[in-house]
Image: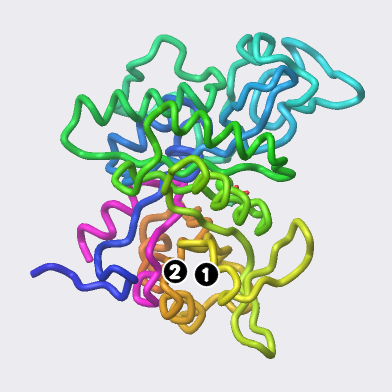
Amino acid sequence: FAASYNTLSGETPLVIAHRGASGYLPEHTLAAYELAIKMGADIVEPDLQTTKDGVLIAMHDSTLNRTTDVESVLGMRNGGYKVSDYTYAEIQQLTVEPASSTASTSYAGYTPSMADPFKVPTFAEVMAFVNAHNSAASDDIGIYPEAKTPNSTAMNQQILNEMKAAGFDAPEDHAILQTFSHEGARELAELQALMGMDNTIAALGYARLTADGFGLLDATTNTISLLSDLALFADGLGVSLSGSAMNADFIKAAHDLGMTVHGWTFNKSDRDAAYAQYEQWVDAGMDGIFTNYTDLAVDYLAER
Ligand code: G3P
Ligand code: CA
């Protein structure tokens, strides 16, 4: 007996490895992505920042000090640790360290396949890693890059150029482009169309109910975009679980406009608590789960 789902497609929700298996290993490292893939993730999420010399790297913060040993290796620049003040060659010297209370530098039963598992990877390296996995395995892992804001036109264009070069340019490649800037998401859709690319586009934000219907708060501009306006260019929404109007009706409104809803962040490490949260949102029709604990989401869906 197969479970049925209230997702837009009617298929099983996607398990999205949020920053890799970041509940277990240092986030945004090849090891965290590899462990997530071994645990059964459908798609892995690199956030993207740009170095001083214009290299796209997988990193959440616009600064290096929360997740790496930059303080001891390179020291402070211009009063801070901004990614944009360091070259890629310098960032290559750093080691990514566990930054969450449950993450560690090892995971029982897992041995990284790469020589330097906790270096800061470039976006190109993450895509090459996913491609190498996909050519060697029967499953097909996708990639879910986030253009961290402020994402200039140049950054958006570079992301698309690198994706095209790596072969992520059509729906069957399972790539989803996301950003908190709704204007940035619209631009990504426009630019990729000019390049003959057709990746899925997702706008991020916080669910709101307005007099004109459901909307999504763009926290970069503090404005609310109506879902009906987002549907003109977006295929999906990445939505905080904490938004004031985040509920089954919001998800249904998105579905009625042909858009999927992926929720973030599922960060409960306790199995019972995680399962209860998955159940609530999968019942509500959620199409994808951004989780730090890949294995718990995979197990939940298998047992549902
Ligand atoms: O991209 C969805 C989710 O990851 C947004 O939150 O801050 O973890 O990138 P953040
Ligand atoms: Ca993200």
Q: Quadrant of residue 48?
A: top right
Q: Which class describes the residues within 10 Å of circle 1: few (<14), some (14-19), or many (20+)? A: some
The vertical placement of 192 against 93, above or below, is below
| Closer-to-camera residue (133/275) | 133
Could you tell me how far apart the alpha carbons at marks 1 and 2 are, in whole angstroms?
7 Å
SS for dot 1: loop
Specify which label sits upstream in the sequence, 1 or 2.
Answer: 1
Residue holding disc 1: 231
Residue 75 image position (x, y, % from top left): 81, 14
Q: Quadrant of the C terminus?
A: bottom left
Residue 191 image position (x, y, % from top left): 57, 45
The vertical placement of 252 against 122, above or below, is below
Residue 123 image position (x, y, % from top left): 52, 28
Of the two numbered discs 1 and 2 in the rendering, the one whose residue sits closer to the viewer = 1
In the displayed structure, does residue 287 sit left or right of residue 303?
A: right
| Disc assigned to residue 260 | none
SS for dot 2: loop
Residue 96 image position (x, y, % from top left): 58, 23
Identify the residue at image location x=64%, y=29%: 67
- Asked if the residue at label 2 sits under 8 Å from ligand 1, the reply is no
- Write the start and end of the magenta stretch as one range: 282-304
The reply to whether discs 1 and 2 touch (Cβ–Cβ < 8 Å) is: yes
| Closer-to-camera residue (171/58) | 171
The vertical placement of 63 against 233, above or below, is above
Residue holding disc 2: 259
The amino acid at mark 2 is Met
Q: Which class describes the residues within 10 Å of circle 2: few (<14), some (14-19), or many (20+)? A: many
Q: Outermost residue, bottom direction?
A: 211
Q: Quadrant of the N terminus?
A: bottom left
**Magenta segment includes 77:** no
Identify the residue at image location x=61%, y=42%: 147
